[in-house]
Each structure stands twice: as structure tokens, then as C-alpha cells.
Amino acid sequence: MYYTIGEAAKRMNLSTSALRYYDKEGLLPFVERTSGGIRMFQDEDFDWLEIIECLKKTGMPIKEIKEFVDWSMEGDSTIDQRLELIKEQQEVVRLQIEAIQENLKILNYKRWYYETAKQAGTCDVHKTMKPEDIPEEFREIALHNKKKNIVTLERPGKGNEREYL
């Protein structure tokens, strides 16, 4: 079965301009065209589009995605290069996940911080809080912040209120 660029875009939840851009960048050499130059996508092309989108969403530059597609078009002689590229991108994603998990820990801590401050009616509650009163999962972050003596920020338009980070 054949699909127009509009149908392919809809099926992949992409814009037609994104597919045209991919084609212009050489990422779609597998897509057939009619004698009039109209792109005609086939069912098997969606597997390609999925891997292209996957690589793009992981932050791989278009140039490297093109290299992967080109190697794939060359056949089995490039399996080693493709495998290495995928391994490298897996490591990139692993590091991204690690960074996101660290950010989530900080957000969880800040949520606890502000919920505690809200209950007390002031952020100053944290100034006198003993380490054992801080939930264990947040203790390291809280103590690190206290050791660094985090600077206070004045929030414009809020008078002289200060918020402690």
C-alpha cells in the first residue's frame, strides 16, 4: 500500500514539512517517487521513519542520522559502523537519563522544601531545621545547600521578600 506525504506525516504524528526536510537532508533515500516527483511512502518505510525519529529524539544530529541511513543503504558491510553508532547513542541516552534523574531528585527536594515552608508559613523554618528532621532522601541535598551557604535571591516586584534556594 502507498501513502502520500500527508498520510505518512499523520501516521507518524509529524508535519509534512518535517518529512520534506528529512528528504532534503538525504534521510529518506528509500522513499519512492512517482514520475511527477510525488513521494509515495510504503508500509516498510515507517520502520525507517521510526528509527529516524528515535535517533532524532535522543539528540542525534541530522548529519549522523544521515550517516546511519547511508550505511544502512550500503548493506551488511557497514554493520560494525551502525552498531558502534547505536552503542554511542545508547551511552548518550543513558547519560541524559542520569541527568534527568538528578534533576528529579532536586525537584522532589524543592517540593518538600516548599510544602514544609507552606505548612510553617515561612521558608525560615529550614534555617533551624536539624538534619534528622529532614527526610533521609533529601538530607544530602539540603546539607549540601547549607554548606555552600546558598545566596538568597530578591525577587523583583515582591518587595523585600527573600527566597532561599
Image (cartoon, rainbow, N blue to C red):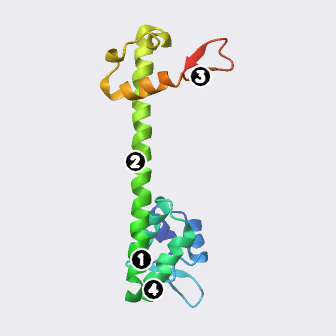
Residue 102 sits in which quadrant? Answer: top left
The amino acid on which the numbered mark 2 sits, given as a three-letter code, is Glu
Gap between marks 1 and 3 measured at Cα: 48 Å
Which residue is label 3 attached to? 151
Q: Tell me which residue sits at (66%, 11%) in the image.
A: 160
User: What is the residue that sits farthest to the bottom in this orientation?
Assistant: 35
Q: Is residue 1 visible?
A: no
- Please report whichever mark, 1 or 4, sits nearer to the chain's N-terminal start: 4
Secondary structure, mark 1, is helix
Which residue is label 4 attached to? 73
Residue 55 spot, x, y in % from top left: 45, 65
- Please report whichever mark, 1 or 3, sits nearer to the chain's N-terminal start: 1
Disc 2: CA contacts within 10 A as few (<14), some (14-19) or many (>=20): few
The answer to whether residue 17 is left or right of residue 59 is: right
Q: Is residue 146 visible?
A: yes
Residue 63 spot, x, y in % from top left: 57, 72
Gap between marks 2 and 3 measured at Cα: 27 Å
Which residue is label 2 attached to? 98
Q: Nearer the viewer, mark 1 or mark 3?
A: 3
In which quadrant is the N terminus drawn? bottom left
Gap between marks 1 and 4 measured at Cα: 11 Å
The amino acid on which the numbered mark 1 sits, given as a three-letter code, is Arg
Q: Nearer the viewer, residue 16 or 164?
A: 164
